Amino acid sequence: MISIRAFGFLEQLQDRHGTRKDEFFSRSESIREAIFDKVTGERDRVLEELAESLSAKKLSERLVSPLIGDVVDYARETDWAILDCMVLAACAGRSPESIAKSMTPALLAFLAIRMLDDALDKHDTYKDDYATVRGALRNRYPDQETVDGAHWLLTTMIFAEAMRHTGEEDNYFSCQTLEAMMAEFTNDRAWNAADYREMAVGKMVNYGLLIYQPILNLIDTDSDDALRTFVECGSFVGQLVNDLGDVESDRQRGQPNFWLVEPSPAAEAMLIGELQRMEKFADTAPDDFSYYASARIHDLADYTLRLLGEARPAASA
């Protein structure tokens, strides 16, 4: 599915941008950690306040409030999904407090959409690594009907809480993501490459912008448009790479997958082309944004190579 040429290109990206990533991570460690702690702490505080408000009613205190603890646990397990945002935030030149204030509402919506996706795909764990909220509920309730109902209601509750804090821009990205998820889930037609690309942009690019845009709004640079395009490319490439690891499971479930709807040479060319676009930004971006770009490119190349594992083709391929 991936040629020896593409493997070589990915390895070059990994090597070329790895040193720059290491350099930037070394000098930005303290600010990245401070931003991460403040952002996740503020999100957890809002969720814990929601649990406390439920505890004011005896029935909710006994039956509903403990479930928010499952949500907080899951949010902390999935914090890896926002780590690249923390790298970008370190370039913003803003205080951790201002970044947390800007990001927290979107993080709640981001979490609710993740829970919704788990429900649609019936995920009790994330790749057998840790329990989703749905998985945690299976330990609380004896029958699947109650688990599913409780999970839908809890997801809706988190979304409602998010909507109390989010603005028009956050809501737009949420709605665009949900629209694309609906198209993917109903899957009532044979997918072609153009349809898939539209769905992937609608779902993953908007889902990514939900948490990146609050940071982008804080950044004042002449490269604003180019930086947002880079972020969008990164989310799109991330979806292509995730699909690469899900080819067989998606084939079995009849789910749309980029590598199943796009002919292999064209699919590979698109992946390489998007990464080359990202490299152009890394070569021309100002100051720390260039280092941020290198870190993102390295991580995407490294993730792709790890997913492919032993699937490297022979040199004669």
Image: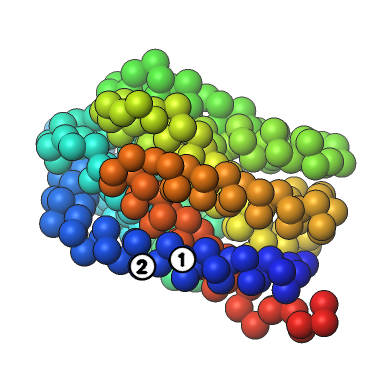
Vertical placement of residue 3 versus 25, above or below: below
Classify mark 2: helix, strand or loop: helix
Number of on-image labels: 2
Which residue does the image show at 84% across and 41% down from the upper left?
192
Q: Position of residue 185 (x, y in %)?
A: 69, 40
**Residue 65, x across and y down, in percent:** 24, 43
- According to the picture, the residue beneath numbered tag 2 turns out to be 19
Q: Residue at x 69, y 79 (%)?
A: 312
Q: Nearer the viewer, residue 13 or 53?
A: 13
User: Mark 2 belongs to which amino acid?
Assistant: Thr
> Label 1 near label 2: C-beta < 8 Å?
yes
Identified at 51% across, 50% down, the residue is 279
Whole-number angstrom distance, CA of label 2 to CA of label 1: 7 Å
Q: Mark 2 Cα within 10 Å, few/some/many (few <14, many 20+)?
A: some
- Three-letter amino acid code of the residue under disc 1: Arg
Residue plotted at (67% across, 61% down):
244
Q: Quadrant of the N terminus?
A: bottom right
Residue 177 image offset from top left, x and y in percent = 55, 32
Query: Is residue 181 rendered to the left or right of residue 101?
Result: right
**Picture disc at residue 287:** none
In the rendered image, which residue does mark 1 sit on?
Answer: 16
Provide residue 5's location: percent of width, then percent of height: 71, 69
Neighbor class of circle 1 (other Cα within 10 Å; few <14, some 14-19, many 20+) is some
Q: Which quadrant of the figure contains the C terminus?
A: bottom right
Of 21 and 232, which appears nearest the observer?
21
Helix, strand, or loop for circle 1? Answer: helix
Q: Residue furthest top?
A: 168
| Residue 150 placement: quadrant | top left
Whether residue 125 sits left or right of residue 161 in the image: it is right
Q: Nearer the viewer, residue 57 or 246?
A: 246
| Residue 165 visible here | yes
